[in-house]
Image: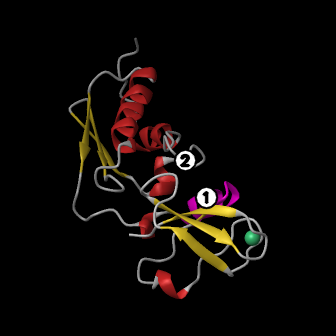
Amino acid sequence: MVAMSEKTTTDQLFELLSSVTDPEIPVLTLQDLGVLRDISIDDGVINVTITPTYAGCPAMQTMRVDIEKALLKAGHQQFNVKESLSPAWSTDWMTPNGREKLRAYGIAPPLKSSCDQSSGGIECPQCNSSEVKRISEFGSTACKALYQCQRCLEPFDYFKCI
Ligand SMILES: [Zn+2]
């Protein structure tokens, strides 16, 4: 066990927690998702603020536990992980790097929430064709919709924007 030393900074904590990944999409870190909102240290107690992605997403509980585990592993004993629901999380918070990782993972990244998803703009993560067809409103999880590319016929998940 390591007592939190004076040299622990919020920057270091950001770096530590940036490596915590989404339990459903392991290529995405909480930073990529924009879930990690704030870290402060008050009287030796670390306060981490996260904003849940989809309300009621079971992954959120796992994320919280993963954050707590990462803190414990780094020797921190005193911390609070708080959820901030306002402003509500939006897929627009996902970083460009996160979107690129999502595409490389085979999931079409969310369009900007201001876009009308029915009018297209979703591209096949395999061949970048925009000739895609929605197969189902729900993909492997409620957060995603199932699409199929009309060019390469590859089915893929689209990370729905909110
Ligand atoms: Zn394709």
The residue labelled by disc 2 is 25
Task: Kindly report the distance in space between the C-alpha atoms of the residues bearing marks 2 and 1.
Answer: 8 Å
Q: Is mark 2 within 8 Å of ligand 1?
A: no
Image coords of residue 24 (percent x, y): 50, 44
In this view, the residue in front, 155 or 143, is 155
**Farthest-out residue, front:** 135
Image coords of residue 28 (percent x, y): 55, 50
Q: Secondary structure at mark 2?
A: loop
In this view, the residue in front, 62 or 73, is 62
User: Which segment did they paint magenta?
Assistant: 95-107
Relative to 84, say whether 43 is above or below: above
Q: Amino acid at mark 1?
A: Leu
Q: Please tell me whether residue 54 belongs to the stretch shown in magenta.
A: no
* Badge 1: residue crowd in 10 Å (few <14, some 14–19, many ≥20): many
Q: Residue at x 67, y 54 (%)?
A: 105
Q: Amino acid at mark 2?
A: Ile
- Tags 2 and 1 touching, CB below 8 Å: yes
Q: Secondary structure at mark 1?
A: helix
In this view, the residue in front, 133 or 122, is 133
Q: Which mark is residue 121?
A: none
Relative to 122, say whether 16 is above or below: above
Q: Earlier in the sequence, mark 2 or mark 1?
A: 2
- In the displayed structure, does residue 130 sit left or right of residue 31? right
Q: Residue at x 23, y 57 (%)?
A: 85
**Farthest-out residue, bottom:** 119
Image coords of residue 142 (percent x, y): 42, 56
Q: Quadrant of the C terminus?
A: bottom left
The residue labelled by disc 1 is 102
Relative to 112, say whether 90 is above or below: above
